[in-house]
Amino acid sequence: MIDRLTTEDVHWVVADYQRYWGDRDRRSLHVTAIVQEFPETCLAYRTADEGILGYLIGFVTPAGVGYVHIIATRDDARGRGVGRALHEVFASAARAQGARRLKAITGTDNTASIDFHQRVGFTVDIVPDYGGPGRDRAVFSRAL
């Protein structure tokens, strides 16, 4: 079941972040203000017996872009369609708020994210210095 991600959920996944992120420490990206201010586009994929299998934190910009700030699937749930389902529900919520396209960003070395986003219909462009001098980023885009 996909429903709204709460700030309590964020605290829970951050405490168990290695199940979602492995050795990459992404705790600082879990901005609870986004969850509080944009609840319709912050999502949790959960089951009664397994808890939170994945989550997505995103929002719609004033320019009509549904921006996926962060998405993760727990290590034991990968390959089960969790990320794809989260993206589909996010796209519907973003469209309902007037978004005309979706956007996400990752590091150029994050091949798993690049492959995943391409599989769910995003195009990818490598943008030099997007993250600052010498910090190229893979920028994903998908029309709605």
Image (tube, helix red, strand yellow):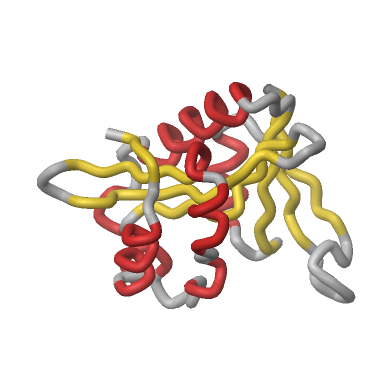
Asked if 129 appears above or below 113 in the picture, the reply is below
- Work out which residue is located at the far front of the displayed protein and give it: 37
| 123 to the left or right of 55 | right
Please name the residue shown 46% across and 29% down the image.
89
Asked if 1 appears above or below 98 in the picture, the reply is below
Q: Nearer the viewer, residue 98 or 100?
A: 98
Please name the residue shown 48% across and 77% down the image.
25
Q: Nearer the viewer, residue 91 or 106?
A: 91
Residue 120, percent across and down? 55, 32
| 142 to the left or right of 27 | right
Q: Would you say residue 69 is visible in this rendering?
A: yes
Q: Nearer the viewer, residue 62 or 51?
A: 62
Quadrant location, the N terminus: top left
Quadrant in the rendering for residue 136:
bottom right
Residue 72, percent across and down? 44, 54
| 77 to the left or right of 106 | left
Residue 11, percent across and down? 35, 68
Number of dots carrying numbers: 0
Q: Would you say residue 112 is visible in this rendering?
A: no
- Work out which residue is located at the far left of the displayed protein and give it: 49
Quadrant in the rendering for residue 9:
bottom left
Please name the residue shown 34% across and 37% down the image.
3
Residue 73, percent across and down? 38, 52
Quadrant location, the C terminus: top right
